[in-house]
Amino acid sequence: MNTYDILLYSTFYVGIVCVFIAEFYIPQLLKYGKTWKASNNYWFNLTCSKSTFTHFYLIAIVLSTYNLFEKRNLLTLCVFIHSIRRLYECFFITKWGHSKIHLSHYLVGIWFYTTLNIGIAFKNGETENRLVSVVIFIAASLDQAVNHQHLSKLKKYSQPSYGLFRYICCAHYFDEFLIYLSFLLMNVGTRALLAHCVVWILVNLGTSSHETGNWYLQKFGYRPRWYMLPYVF
């Protein structure tokens, strides 16, 4: 492992440690959207609109477009497609309302999509598991698109009940996990990088799904059986 890899992967370890510290000692930092509450603490109130998620995908599109033209492989194509779809949903599907995220969430999002694409730019390798990875990517992407449509049509802060939402609190997060799992399978050269991305998604979105599930339980007295991963969590 060279110095570049050590620096790149260490950012994931720092991020994961920060999530666990926040979960046990500063839970207010992990709340956003429907779970966010105003605080008397100045630092907790450093927020921005949740619609700034669009910035993540704008960055991802710029960087993934460069990777697509430079690498021209299955992974760079799928990352580009995923980024385009998510930006489209941000503009035309998602209803942001007045939802807020903490400034730390915003900075983490910028870090993740920048690190993902820059990491891919510096990695080379043969495409593997083409059929399996493409099937997983397409199925998860379609399901996530449908789930985002469903969420956009719900009355504000109501509980989703379509499809996998009957069993998983955050079915769209489960889709995200599958999408990045498909990326992991696609290219041998980026396997270590994408493994770190998958672990990050499990920790970060797993924590968010836990917050969401507990909020459902408090507000509605019920939550689906699993938070994010069927039969696991």
Image: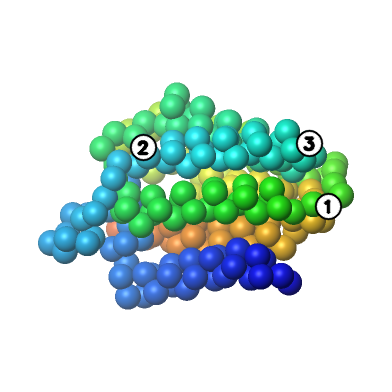
In x, y percent, where is residue 25?
Answer: 32, 75
Q: Residue reaching furthest top?
A: 92
- Distance from disc 1 to disc 2, alpha carbons, whole Å, reads 36 Å
Residue denoted by label 3:
72
Q: Quadrant of residue 194?
A: bottom right
The amino acid on which the numbered mark 2 sits, given as a three-letter code, is Ser
Res. 204 in view = yes
The amino acid on which the numbered mark 3 sits, given as a three-letter code, is Arg
Res. 74 in view = no
In x, y percent, where is residue 7?
Answer: 59, 68
Nearer to me, 88 or 112: 112
- From the image, state whether disc 1 or disc 2 is nearer to you: 1
Is residue 144 rendered to the left or right of residue 122?
A: left
Return the disc, 1 or 2, that comes first in the chain's sequence: 2
Residue denoted by label 1:
125
- Distance from disc 1 to disc 3, alpha carbons, whole Å, reads 12 Å
Q: What element carries label 1?
A: loop
Q: Quadrant of residue 5?
A: bottom right
Q: Which numbered circle lies on residue 51?
A: 2
Return the disc, 1 or 3, that comes first in the chain's sequence: 3
Nearer to me, 74 or 168: 74
Q: Residue at x 79, y 48 (%)?
A: 186
Q: Which residue is drawn at 65% across and 54% down?
A: 119
Q: What element carries label 3?
A: loop
Q: Quadrant of the N terminus?
A: bottom right
